[in-house]
Image (spheres, rainbow, N blue to C red):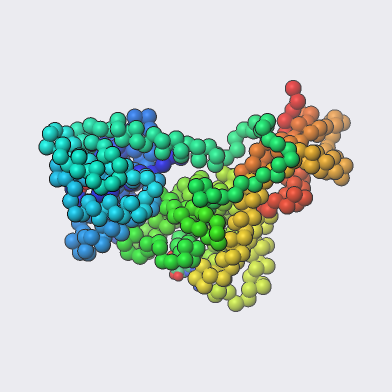
Amino acid sequence: MSFTLAIVGRPNVGKSTLFNRLVGKKLALVDDQPGVTRDLREGEARLGDMRFTVIDTAGLEDATDDSLQGRMRRLTERAVDMADVCLFMIDARAGVTPTDLIFAEILRKRSAHVILAANKGEGAAADAGVIEAYSLGLGEPIRLSAEHGEGLNDLYGQLLPIEEKFAEIAKANAPVVDVTVDEDFDEDEDYVPVPTQEKPLQIAVVGRPNAGKSTLINQILGEDKMLTGPEAGITRDAISTRTVWNDVPMRIFDTAGMRKKAKVQDKLEKLSVSDGLRAVKFAEVVVVLLDAAIPFEQQDLRIADLAEREGRAVIVAVNKWDIEDAKQEKLRDLKEAFGRLLPQLRGAPLITVSAKTGRGMDRLHDAIMRAYDVWNRRIPTAQLNRWLIGMLEQHPPPAPQGKRIKLRYMTQAKTRPPGFVVMCSHPDKIPESYNRYLVNGLREDFDMPGTPIRLFMRGQG
Ligand code: GDP
Ligand code: GDP
């Protein structure tokens, strides 16, 4: 998982030329379905050993039907919101134009990272324009020639710190593959990190097209910030928005690029699973949003399962609750279906909401905070081992071929999600049902709903 770079700037400065150079022939986004607006192009970029996603705001030249300024602004804002870093390009030979100033203003307000590039920088004709670029107040410009491939080292240099930052985030969010016991862990400290402004709580809202994701996110944001309607294009990227919800800084990833379009419905349904995957990978807490009228469809089950396997804290939110009449009965049915269809998410909260009216939003917020808390939880080793002794007494492990399996000692090896290691004899002989007994016990006795719990059996020497 890497970062996303958006190339923005007025028409004709050389954005597409740079895009093509970075992406090469392998264009990632190919969607030839007619009727789908495609004003953002996305591709997988290579620059030296660096890999990242690049978005190009091409297609502005065709904007004859609408005010160019308005479209340009909307498109640019969308690209900026989707990206982790923006490359703002001007034409060094033309110098800074009034339109460039408009772009600079948008970026200053909206983008966390801006890299300034003065393109068409080859030759002396560009000297004056490169110097003028400083006046934009966006730092030192990179002198670039997209056409001749000059200045790409400087671009690489400016992207490096961003790549490093993202590698760290990806590492922190990596699913459990192997477990090493955390030696530094202080037993007495039941530490739960609190999201800060720099490290907001990362949540993903996933679900089928039309479940109400955009409505829900707008409800959280408290205004009609997300761009929907005919302007919206198709992108495979997960869009993220920063906000503060009930005093908690959050970064919300969603799949809003996936708009419902009658003709391409089927294709979009398929796409939105991989799109959702990207959002899930970034998230700490995943909200699976269901439509109360058609809950637990195949696609919902797949994305929920995926979130669990990726080790995310999961909340199931049933939307459009305002149009349900027999609420009690419906809730009973939903709970039954949940237990039957998603046994792997046992204990995850099921919340009913109305994204439209805002009912249930506080409950959803509480569930997110609680799941996040559990996901980060540390249980002291002494407490775990006291618990283990009780569990063993209540229900001793089986004795295959008369050989008693000894579970000797237990510790929490990691958090996010919680992972535990049990030292034992014959780890390969312990049946899955016994593992489940322990995991369910942990979940209940330590009050850990809605988070995947990993349990590893380890032999000793
Ligand atoms: P966009 O509208 O910003 O995407 O711009 P394009 O990538 O389509 O480029 C507009 C024009 O500028 C094309 O004719 C390109 O060949 C030309 N161009 C792009 N980069 C450079 C460059 O580094 N140097 C020169 N001289 N021309 C360039
Ligand atoms: P998305 O495709 O998941 O982003 O779904 P949208 O947010 O675009 O919503 C799809 C449709 O469901 C729109 O017509 C919304 O107005 C409607 N909708 C969303 N949330 C609710 C809700 O809580 N109650 C009702 N009655 N309709 C809703």
Compared to 69, does 17 lie above or below? Answer: above
Which residue is at the front of the view, 19 or 156?
156
Q: Residue 154: x and y, percent?
A: 30, 32
Q: Residue 144: x and y, percent?
A: 23, 36
Residue at left offset 42%, top offset 57%: 256
Residue at left offset 85%, top offset 30%: 403
Residue at left offset 36%, top offset 36%: 159
Q: Residue 422: x and y, percent?
A: 75, 35
Compared to 120, does 49 lie above or below? Answer: above
- Report if residue 327 is visible in the image: yes
Q: Judge from the rendering whether residue 193 lies leftward or rightward of residue 443; answer left or right.
A: left
- Report if residue 280 is visible in the image: no
Which residue is at the front of the view, 431 or 103?
103
Q: Residue 458: x and y, percent?
A: 72, 30
Which quadrant of the structure image shows residue 35? bottom left
Residue at left offset 26%, top offset 62%: 70
Q: Residue furthest top?
A: 461
Q: Judge from the rendering whether residue 126 lies leftward or rightward of residue 450; answer left or right.
A: left
Please identify the quadrant where the C terminus is shown.
top right
Q: Residue furthest bottom?
A: 325
Which quadrant of the structure image shows residue 109? bottom left
Counting every numbered tag in the picture gives 0
